[in-house]
Amino acid sequence: GKEQRNSHYNLAELGLGVDFYKDRGFFFEGNLGYSYGSLSYTHRLFPTSDVKTHWITMDANISHTFLLDGMFYGGVKSNIFVGSSTNNTDYYTLEGFYDDCFNRATVIPYFGVRLRFQFIKLDFRIGGQAIPYLNANKIAFHNMYKTHVEGLYYELRLAIKLFSTSNPTKPVNSLFS
């Protein structure tokens, strides 16, 4: 028979971002951060056997205030691989995952929707991994299994405004005025 095992790769990211927003025109945003990942065969938040990964993340996006005040945007995200470690409690589940099973850098173009409130920003992004986190050929080389890496990328982001140089007394124009 044909055996198939689906793995789950969850990432959590912490970082700082800067944006350049004005009343009319283009809106630019850039982010730099650290990302921690867990690759496992289980759906649990803290699996007993997993591969932990560390990444430096960078991303940039652009929107226009004409598109519902910058609500829709497009961008590119990239991650630089720092390292990994294996937590293999049963000594065989994750055998064959080494640092070279992860691409050194990723490229992920995406489309996003942004909701901005006074101090909080909520984003949903979806895109495709042009260069994914995992290198399917290296995984197959080490494990002797044909491997497929899903190219779908989706992310939910929550940002909290730390400070702003904008004028808080300036009135906000309505979208419908």
Image (cartoon, helix red, strand yellow):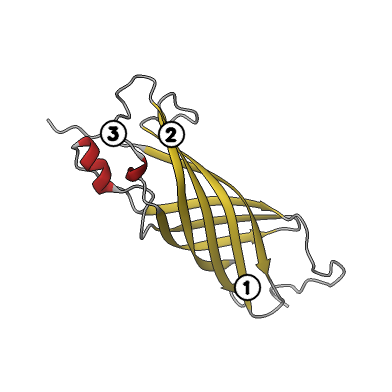
Q: Residue at x 64, y 80 (%)?
A: 25
* Label drawn at residue 97: none
67 sits to left or right of 146? right
- Residue 97 lies, in percent from the top left, at 32, 36
- Residue 26 lies, in percent from the top left, at 61, 77
Question: Which quadrant holds residue 141?
Answer: top left
Question: What type is the residue that disc 2 sits on?
Answer: Ser
List the single residue furthest toward the left.
1
How far is the residue under mark 2 from the one under mark 3? 12 Å
Q: Which residue is mark 3?
A: 96
Q: Which residue is mark 1?
A: 27
Task: Work out which quarter of the rendered image holds the N terminus and state it.
Answer: top left
List the single residue furthest toward the right.
169
Q: Which residue is mark 2?
A: 85
How far is the residue under mark 1 from the one under mark 2? 39 Å
Question: What type is the residue that disc 1 sits on?
Answer: Phe
Q: Residue at x 41, y 60 (%)?
A: 107
Classify 1 as above or below 166: above
Question: What type is the residue that disc 3 sits on?
Answer: Gly
